Amino acid sequence: MTHTHSVKSAPRHAALGLTDEQAVAMYEKMILARKFDERGQLLQRAGKVNFHISGINQEPSQVAMAFAMDLKNDWFLPYYRDYAFVLSLGMTVKELMLSLFAKGEDPNSAGRQMPGHFGAKRLRIVTGSSPVTTQVPHAAGFALAAKMRGERSVSLVSFGEGSSNQGDFHEGCNFAGVMKLPVIFVCQNNGYAISVPLSKQTAGRISDRALGYGFPGVQVDGNDVLETYRVFKEAHDRALAGEGPTLVEIVTYRVTPHSTSDNDLVYRTKEEVEIHKAKDGIPAYRRYLTEAGLWSEEQEQELQARIREEIDEATEYGERAPFQAVEDAFRHVYAETANGEAI
Amino acid sequence: MTHTHSVKSAPRHAALGLTDEQAVAMYEKMILARKFDERGQLLQRAGKVNFHISGINQEPSQVAMAFAMDLKNDWFLPYYRDYAFVLSLGMTVKELMLSLFAKGEDPNSAGRQMPGHFGAKRLRIVTGSSPVTTQVPHAAGFALAAKMRGERSVSLVSFGEGSSNQGDFHEGCNFAGVMKLPVIFVCQNNGYAISVPLSKQTAGRISDRALGYGFPGVQVDGNDVLETYRVFKEAHDRALAGEGPTLVEIVTYRVTPHSTSDNDLVYRTKEEVEIHKAKDGIPAYRRYLTEAGLWSEEQEQELQARIREEIDEATEYGERAPFQAVEDAFRHVYAETANGEAI
Amino acid sequence: MPVIEYIEAIRTAMKEEMERDERVFVLGEDVGLKGGVFGTTKGLQQQFGELRSLDTPLAESAIAGVAIGAAMAGMRPIAEMQYSDFMFPATNQIISEAAKIRYRSNNDWSCPLVVRAPIGGGVFGGLYHSQCPESVFFGTPGLKIVAPATAYDAKGLLLSAIRDPDPVLFFENKKCYRLVSDEVPEGEYTVPIGKSKVMREGDDITVIGYSMPLHFAMQAAEELSRDEGVEAHILDLRTIQPLDREGVLEAAARTGKVLIVHEDNKTGGVGAEVAAIISEELLYDLDAPIRRLCAPDVPAMPINPPGEKHYLLNKDKLKAAMLDLARF
Amino acid sequence: MPVIEYIEAIRTAMKEEMERDERVFVLGEDVGLKGGVFGTTKGLQQQFGELRSLDTPLAESAIAGVAIGAAMAGMRPIAEMQYSDFMFPATNQIISEAAKIRYRSNNDWSCPLVVRAPIGGGVFGGLYHSQCPESVFFGTPGLKIVAPATAYDAKGLLLSAIRDPDPVLFFENKKCYRLVSDEVPEGEYTVPIGKSKVMREGDDITVIGYSMPLHFAMQAAEELSRDEGVEAHILDLRTIQPLDREGVLEAAARTGKVLIVHEDNKTGGVGAEVAAIISEELLYDLDAPIRRLCAPDVPAMPINPPGEKHYLLNKDKLKAAMLDLARF
Ligand SMILES: Cc1ncc(C[n+]2csc(CCOP(=O)(O)OP(=O)(O)O)c2C)c(N)n1
Ligand SMILES: Cc1ncc(C[n+]2csc(CCOP(=O)(O)OP(=O)(O)O)c2C)c(N)n1
Ligand SMILES: [Mg+2]
Ligand SMILES: [Mg+2]
């Protein structure tokens, strides 16, 4: 796929159909996600929570993909690093904190699942599990349901590049391809699957795989927010136009260890990480907004303060909230009747 | 991949490195397989056996791929239509008949498995099962073992185009690709998976899938014996040279119903089948041999007679042979010690 | 009431439910024009179109996974596995996903899915067209599993399965398809999931089982009644998960002598759990050790006819075991 | 004799066997430089190189399938599943292939493969990092399944598993990794597959189980001995397939009161088969109904600490159940 940035006079975001408010909102979501994520790391180090898994450095593209979607009609099947994505879909920091602290009020799983296992029907975020890539055929199933019911709905599913080597990737993509279903497959290629670098995962290029399923595959620099938005917008348009799926490979890099349980310096160097940290898409996007006259130092400080407060409150709330009562720990294996019996 | 038939003076087969004897032997194997297969159909219709599954029309390319292999060192993982392939590897018609009649002497499984489930260690033919595509990662495993032991051995695995949509295709190809293993993946694309046409299996081209695993994919006309041989020879050379796997998509057509249990006219027309029957690669190859001065009407009659006799004998032998004794029916779940106990 | 074949009962259930509820659709390999390799979905594509009787690519994990997605989206998919032997590629989708969706989301999401799969041997299908995979899925909380033995139950349980808000594995016995026929009401009725059924009353021995072997038990029981004066009490579990504890205990208590039968191999089968439940609850009411008559612990039956026969249960094997127990 | 950790025993077994036999290699996710997510393969890549401690792509069906191919080719692969929760994508390769290769080829081919997978909870891993998948594979003829509880058995059984001519599933308990240490001889020794071990002798009640819960049983037994004068006889199955029938029957007969324990959920678990065997063979020697103490029939434990604790067995739960049985 080739493309040109055609409109000369309008700023890039406007040319892509984004309002100034949206362009700014995107920035705010990135920062919110980054700060939440940093807090998660702190809380784990402080021994307040057992585990945190980070999406740092992947936020710019996650926000971009969310903003290209139709929040009222689409279906979302994120993976565990998608904090910025789900925050952009309407999940709150408080909800993420409830999940991080595994508390009963957590809408994702009532503190049953690990953090990063998103799910909230009200936000059309589909419940996810730990075994990677199982959500890929589910996304095809949501799209099939939409097609059958004649709904204008697209499903977006994301996963890592390691996970794209599972059979379910192949089967799900092929199914969606042959039925021309409205699905956007998103591979967030961050270079590692725990300790295993891309070079040991595959000798091919992930985006090239789409060809074998009969639909387009696009590689995009995840640090380039607006270009990522453009690619998703196009994929979304194709899906709605009945042209079928698109595979988007977001090229990014995992700057944190795999999770708080991982020591990444066993398998890569600090230097390598630093090189990629320097390419962070957030400052670049901030510069873009500043140059476009949409952002200022004052706004930045206001935002940082607001977010800190939001996260502080959420942290406190999450920490204090009760766990799910143990009497309820075994409920919902099957549907219950009105009086609480299994049917 | 493009290629030219370069050597002008020498006949095509010689230019490819095939001796006259080999060129003729290839023809004989095709006829043998065809006649065996026709007998299988007859036997089923006569009620002598319960089931037959046919490889008719796929023989030319199956023979070509066998002749490109090193029978002493390579490993072979065929699928159920590969009669011509296994006959070319050294399995006998008698052995195939024993399998068709499910008799105890059948080297493939002692009459435990359905016909078409090949396996014979002495011929380096790896035991296969019914669930399709499981053999694909096995082929990578054989190649990995060869690599570890420094053996000059290639593994060849075949399967249908429907089967290429299983997760194991993806996982096996990707594994072999990333480790540059000496494997030849062979998709015998015969247009149908039971009743489901290619157009409902995938919107992509099978051979294009190789790209996503970082190795070449080639499509070849399975009715063109010598071109198919050339493609396999090249794949074999690449594998031995340490250049990794090749995916070969043989374009062919299933002229018979899926098996003797299938009525294909429910889902396709007689006309469609006739068109493809007319493209049979065997007469074309016979013409080639005749024009090259290697084959005559007399030789043809001698061959037909010889094969008829061989098949008659094998049929009689197979029919008369005993079933595996029921006392042995439950043996070999686990290894036995010398005195017949499970260890 | 019309007497119809077991396979016809299954087809009718799908057809009627697809007429009643447009969320219901069937997907699988060859379910479309061909109507399935056994003919179970015959006519559905003609009546309901390509989308609702959907030929899928040859990929069971996708069949299950796509169906799970569609179920979460509010549809009522029936995923057909061509043979139960071929559902193992879908294990991860069934066990990690379908079974856990409600629980892991604390009831926010659910997965009203039916997976239909033909089990059992006796069709000269050999190792991979004859298996009983029950024990693989049995014991996975979050799944329901049914395995009807009669046409009546096949239709009634399939309607219940389709309407059930949770994932149900529907194990239909391919040998029953055309061998078993019985009275099946026209139109709607359901057989409740989780309830066993007394097929025959008797006071001498109790036979507990499910699916095809029960027909051998019934034949054997008639002969034993006639020839030996032994009266067998026969319980069809019908649902194997959740097991009908009360039904099992009542049937076992009735005679104090229990024979459990299934075609799945013995070790680790459903019969072990039935025996364990009885030995947990009824130990002092037993007049004989709990016996199990099942397939041998061998991967699956050979295709050659003597080997297949040697492997499978039949009326005579049942009769011998039942008589032996009666005489204990 | 040196006292070492359970995880160290596993690592040592692999290391020593890789030194002894160059056909042995380990493959899996992160088993190379990282040495596994638990550290089980630490140092192996440094010692044996990239091929023999092989980082695979993230694809369990390929890990199993490639290992099966290599095993048929004459190698002795050890396939590591990062968590047993993630081995379900490999189910088809394990059940349809590894388990049936010898049988289907009438002994022409074989599949000497070990699949190692960490089972069990108590590490705040939640639904998908805590499961016990035994019941899924248990009952599949052609597979052997071991599940050691001690460092000694872990090493000895792993050596036996690697040398076994058939596929062995090696279920190591991740909670045991660093919690359990015991005396382990240096160098070579094997623990036979298929033989249980009496961990403690006693005449009042019999506890039969495998893996982590046995340690709770041992602690509870000491307290019961001291406080109540109840002496428990404790049998470690060690191998869950094939079950040691004689060992089970002997242990059950010793006291006539049997409690079966495992962390896998109750219904359809290994305990059901143990109960069934006893009720088949020893009915008249029992002084109490056969009891089972297992995880609840719930998909898996929640990650939140109270929920996890509520789900898991522990010394107190064992003690209460053992005392109750003793008093029966
Ligand atoms: C089926 C399965 N196997 C193994 C794991 C353990 N695991 C969790 S994350 C992970 C690496 C995933 O890498 P990638 O897909 O690249 O995503 P990333 O974490 O890099 O974002 C692994 C192996 C799992 N969750 N599921
Ligand atoms: C996992 C699995 N699912 C279903 C089947 C049943 N089945 C046997 S052959 C076949 C079609 C195979 O089609 P293709 O791969 O194109 O090979 P062909 O028969 O056309 O040569 C199917 C669905 C099977 N054997 N294995
Ligand atoms: Mg990654
Ligand atoms: Mg085909």
Image: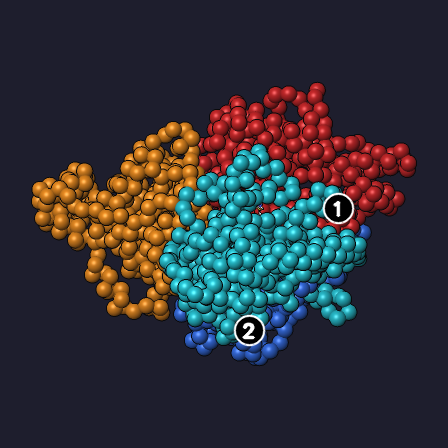
Chain colours: A orange, B cyan, C red, D blue
Q: Where does residue C188 sit, x and y in percent of width and height?
A: 60, 22
Left or right: C76 with respect to D271?
left
| SS label for mark 2 | loop
Frontmost residue, C163 versus B308: B308
Dot 2, how many residues are within 10 Å of its Cα: few (below 14), some (14-19), or many (20+)? some
Look at the picture and state if D200 lies above or below A22: below
Quadrant where the N terminus of chain D sits is bottom right
Say which residue appears at 57% left-offset and 28% top-offset.
C43
Q: Where does residue A264 sit, x and y in percent of width and height?
A: 34, 65
Answer whether residue C190 is visible to the viewer in this image: yes
Q: Where does residue A334 sit, x and y in percent of width and height?
A: 53, 37
Look at the picture and state if A175 lies above or below A189: above
User: CB atoms at circles 1 and 2 under 8 Å apart?
Assistant: no
At label 1, the amino acid type is Lys
Answer whether residue B183 is visible to the viewer in this image: no
Left or right: B227 with respect to C295?
left
Q: Where does residue A194 sit, x and y in percent of width and height?
A: 38, 61
Chain at tag 1: B
Q: Which residue is mark 2?
A: D23
Mark 1 or mark 2, which is nearer to you? 1
Look at the picture and state if A328 lies above or below D77: above
At label 2, the amino acid type is Arg
Look at the picture and state if C73 lies above or below A64: above
Say which residue appears at 61% left-offset and 37% top-offset.
B263
